[in-house]
Amino acid sequence: MLLGYSRRGNDDVLAMQMLLAARSIAPNLDSDADFQLLSLLNQERDIVKILGTPSRVYSVALSPDGQEIVAAGGDHTARLWDTATGKPGGQPMRHDSAVTSVAFSPDGTRIASGSKDGTVRLWDATGHPTTVPLQGHKGAVVSLAFNHDGTQIVTGSADYTIRLWAAGSGTQLGQLHGHTGMVSGVAFSPDGTRIVSGSVDTSARIWDAVQHTQIAELRGHKGAVVGVSFNPDGTRIASASTDKTVRTWDAIAKQPIEPPLRGHGDMVLSVAFSPDGTKITSGSADRNSPTVGSRHRSPDRGATERSRRSCT
């Protein structure tokens, strides 16, 4: 899930920064889709002009083939956009309140959206609903993700809980309790057997996705943990925090791998591993944005490398 948040009002640009840091953009940061989006940013300088969004953008996700963006809006809708033309596609996907999280299924045929209305809704790739709204959360659904084969969805909420759902039927499969603050980031492990979550309570936690139990609590951040990601083989976790750092964890030993990765000048809002697991990409609300992202060498390669791409 990509959270579009800013204290300075440039929510849409930050949302695009975090889109480019998402794992869903794979194969890598140098893909044609990434440069296509960067080109659009360079040409227009303002994502509101590119996408013509009618309201604040809270979350964005790129389709697996890189041809569409789904944007979650404050106007109670999620909307599809063509990455090549910036034109809308499909029909608006409507909730009863602001849409705060969106994700494509791994095969790109479905979209999941979460909202301040407390529901999760499932749509086909043209924006038509495929199930009734998924109800259970008692607060806004601020983070969500599909598992590796698209059969399950995990959601994190302002009600402090995590819930699992069957993507086909919409049946709730389980609840995970333990966080003491809003669950602002969730992700499945590559094999779908574990979940990592991040919360405003400053912790990241690992969960058993089958038994629905907590495996470990990862402490170290001094601010809210708003982005989490597994590496491609599921042995490491990266977490992004409002404390301006990225931390890396051994997912097996459940311990930090090295000191925090520093360099951002503001809260770090998203994080992802490269497909080969050798780099970490993070998206931040740096004051010297427009910064698209920063890269760090893999923890097992030592020193931190930070590079920036600017839209200017």
Image (cartoon, helix red, strand yellow):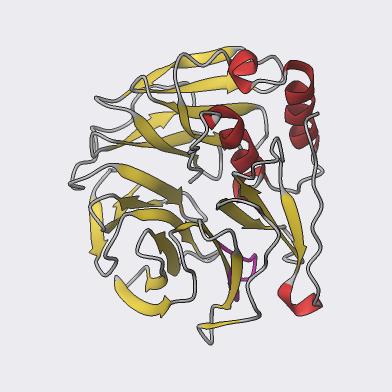
Residue at 65%, 16% (x, y): give it: 50
Q: Give residue 211's position: percent from left, percent from top.
A: 30, 74
Q: Give residue 195's position: percent from left, percent from top.
A: 43, 65
| First to last magenta residue range | 228-237
* Magenta run includes residue 233: yes
* Magenta run includes residue 219: no
From the viewer's side, name the closer residue of 209 and 43.
43
Q: Give residue 203's position: percent from left, percent from top.
A: 41, 69
Please say whether residue 297 is visible from this viewpoint: yes
From the viewer's side, name the closer residue of 282 and 77.
282
In this picture, is 96 found above or below 1? above
214 sits to left or right of 90: left
**The C terminus lies in quadrant:** top right
In this picture, is 103 found above or below 95? below
Residue at 48%, 42% (x, y): give it: 3
In this picture, is 158 found above or below 76? below
Residue at 53%, 34% (x, y): give it: 60
Q: Give residue 24's position: percent from left, percent from top.
A: 60, 46
15 sits to left or right of 161: right
147 sits to left or right of 48: left
User: Within the image, what quadrant is residue 178 found in?
Assistant: bottom left
In this picture, is 150 found above or below 161? above
Report the number of numbered marks: 0
Residue at 55%, 45% (x, y): give it: 106
Please say whether residue 168 is visible from this viewpoint: no
